[in-house]
Image (spheres, rainbow, N blue to C red):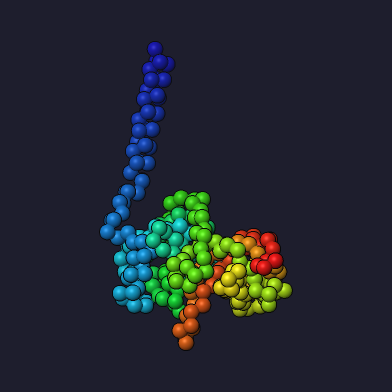
């Protein structure tokens, strides 16, 4: 009888202890904070805020941006920056505290507090220079949310339709003067321009950093499709240059006969 009573008491203590442990674990959980929908912004909203307030507008409140990473800095073609897209537009995220903080395919929520906006020579930048650890401002909501590149014509690019967005240019080739070159100057410390054209003669620059992993790769000599992120550069004379930033040379698929062949 004593043995049965001892077993019963021990079992009861275990149950009670588990209950206290469970309660403690519940109390340790951080409170769930619902987002204020009035403080959720789109990328288009960021363009509008910059247009209304000018450069160097700083977010002092906790506004949130939800967007998908379409270009990261893993190839070395860009460094401590990335490009994001949502259903409204695309934007450059610049001066991130750590390389590799964002990866292509991540759908992220970014706290904009402390960041600023700047139209840098035609390219819209969301700048985190004053945020010591960008990783604390970002939460990955989903992985592998890859955005398919939009098929774009060069005349649409000239109109600004695809600024800072992932595109696929069809039936393009490097101009004859560039076909003997590499993407950039391996071991250099700058960026190089190479020109793609379509069969009507319209052109767009491919701009590649000398420190990119594929800087020394020879340019393909055929015709085909090219995938990358479109950016705009306006010089001091207000001349606009449209550029394609390559994520991976495997996405420059120029294996078909050239124009007129």
Instruction: Answer yes or no: is residue 42 visible.
Output: yes
Q: Outermost residue, top direction?
A: 1
Q: Position of residue 73 (x, y in %)?
A: 55, 65
Q: Outermost residue, bottom direction?
A: 237
Q: Quadrant of residue 253?
A: bottom right
The answer to whether 249 is drawn above or below residue 5 in the figure is below
Q: Position of residue 42 (x, y in %)?
A: 36, 61
Query: Which quarter shows the N terminus?
Result: top left
Q: Quadrant of residue 57?
A: bottom left
Residue at image location 40% in from the left, 24% down from the top:
11
Residue at image location 51% in from the left, 50% down from the top:
144
Q: Outermost residue, right direction?
A: 180
Between residues 237 and 157, which one lies in front from this camera angle?
Answer: 157
Instruction: Answer yes or no: is residue 136 visible.
Output: no
Q: Position of residue 193 (x, y in %)?
A: 60, 76
Residue 179 is left or right of residue 139, and the answer is: right
Between residues 93 and 255, which one lies in front from this camera angle?
Answer: 255
Residue at image location 44% in from the left, 76% down from the top:
122
The answer to whether 73 is drawn above or below residue 235 in the figure is above
Q: How many marks?
A: 0
Residue at image location 33% in from the left, 70% down from the top:
48
Residue 27 is left or right of residue 240, and the answer is: left
Q: Position of residue 147 (x, y in %)?
A: 49, 55
Query: Which quarter shows the C terminus?
Result: bottom right
Residue 25 is left or right of residue 240, and the answer is: left
């Amino acid at each position: 009888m004593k043995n049965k009573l001892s077993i019963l008491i021990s079992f009861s203590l275990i149950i009670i202890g588990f209950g206290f442990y469970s309660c403690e674990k519940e109390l340790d959980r951080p409170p769930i904070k619902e987002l204020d929908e009035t403080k959720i912004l789109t990328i288009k909203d960021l363009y509008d805020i910059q247009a209304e307030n000018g450069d160097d507008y700083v977010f002092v409140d906790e506004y949130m941006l939800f967007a998908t990473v379409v270009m990261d800095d893993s190839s070395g073609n860009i460094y401590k920056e990335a490009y994001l897209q949502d259903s409204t537009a695309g934007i450059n995220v610049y001066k991130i505290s750590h390389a590799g903080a964002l990866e292509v395919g991540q759908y992220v929520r970014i706290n904009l507090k402390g960041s600023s906006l700047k139209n840098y020579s035609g390219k819209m930048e969301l700048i985190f220079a004053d945020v010591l650890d960008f990783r604390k401002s970002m939460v990955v909501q989903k992985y592998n949310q890859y955005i398919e590149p939009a098929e774009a014509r060069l005349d649409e690019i000239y109109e600004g339709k695809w600024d800072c967005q992932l595109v696929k240019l069809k039936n393009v080739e490097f101009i004859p003067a560039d076909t003997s070159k590499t993407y950039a100057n391996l071991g250099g410390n700058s960026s190089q321009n190479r020109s793609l054209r379509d069969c009507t003669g319209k052109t767009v620059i491919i701009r590649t950093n000398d420190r990119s992993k594929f800087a020394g790769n020879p340019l393909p000599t055929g015709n085909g499709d090219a995938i990358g992120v479109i950016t705009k550069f306006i010089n001091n004379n207000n001349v606009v240059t449209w550029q394609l930033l390559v994520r991976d040379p495997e996405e420059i698929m120029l294996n078909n006969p050239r124009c007129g062949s």
